[in-house]
Image (cartoon, rainbow, N blue to C red):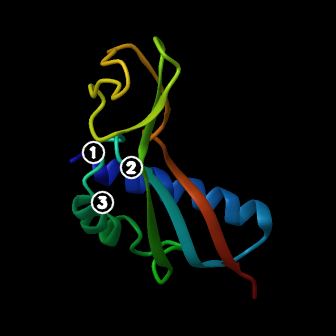
C-alpha cells in the first residue's frame, strides 16, 4: 500500500514548511491529487489517519481536490481530457500525447496556527 508512504511524505513536507514558517499546528491541509497519479483515495484516507498520529497534522482538516488528466495530442495539438494514461486523441485517434496534468500529488495549501 504505497498510499501510506505518500501520506508519510506529505506529513514530513508539511512539518518542514510549518517549522520554516514558525508555526505550531496545522488547522487545514489541501491536497491536489491527479486522476492519473495511481492513488486510491479511500486507501489514502485510511493511511492518513495512521500517518498523522502524534504529528502537527493530527487534528488538521484534510481536503483532497482531484485534478483531471489533460493531455495534448502530438499529432494534431488538440488538448483533451484523459480517463486513462493510454487514451487516444478524440480528434485524430493519435496515440502520441504530452501529459499536461493529472499525475500530480501536491500540497496546495496549509493553514498554520501560531501560539
Q: Distance between the residues labelled 3 and 1?
A: 9 Å
Counting residues from the start of the chain, the first of labels 3 and 1 encountered is 1
Rendered view: 80 above or below 13: above
Q: Which residue is drawn at 50% across and 61% down?
A: 31
Verify CB contact (< 8 Å) between mark 2 and mark 1.
yes
| Residue pointed to by mark 1 | 2
Q: How far apart are marks 2 and 1 (CA)?
A: 6 Å
Tell whether 56 sits left or right of 69: right
| Residue pointed to by mark 3 | 44
Task: State the image coordinates of residue 43 (x, y, percent, origin top left).
Answer: 22, 59
Q: In which quarter of the view is residue 45 placed?
A: bottom left
Tell whether 28 sits left or right of 104: right
Q: In which quarter of the view is residue 73 placed?
A: top left
Secondary-structure class at tag 2: helix
| Residue pointed to by mark 2 | 6
Counting residues from the start of the chain, the first of labels 3 and 2 encountered is 2
Verify CB contact (< 8 Å) between mark 3 and mark 2.
yes
Nearest to the observer: residue 92 or residue 5: 92
Nearest to the observer: residue 104 or residue 68: 68
Rendered view: 7 above or below 113: above
Q: Which residue lies furthest to the front in this view?
A: 91
Q: Which residue is drawn at 69% across and 66% down?
A: 18
Nearest to the observer: residue 63 or residue 18: 63
* Total numbered labels: 3
Task: State the image coordinates of residue 35 (x, y, percent, origin top left).
Answer: 35, 47
Amino acid at each position: 500500500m504505497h498510499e501510506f508512504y505518500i501520506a508519510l511524505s506529505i506529513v514530513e513536507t508539511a512539518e518542514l514548511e510549518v517549522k520554516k514558517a514558525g508555526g505550531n499546528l496545522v488547522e487545514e491541509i489541501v491536497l491536489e491529487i491527479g486522476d492519473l497519479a495511481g492513488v486510491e483515495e479511500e486507501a489514502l484516507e485510511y493511511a492518513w489517519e495512521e500517518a498523522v498520529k502524534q504529528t502537527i497534522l493530527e487534528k488538521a482538516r484534510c481536503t483532497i481536490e482531484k485534478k483531471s488528466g489533460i493531455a495534448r495530442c502530438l499529432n494534431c495539438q488538440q488538448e483533451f481530457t484523459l480517463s486513462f494514461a493510454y487514451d487516444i486523441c478524440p480528434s485524430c485517434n493519435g496515440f502520441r500525447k504530452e501529459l499536461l496534468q493529472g499525475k500530480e500529488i501536491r500540497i496546495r495549501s496549509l493553514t498554520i496556527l501560531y501560539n
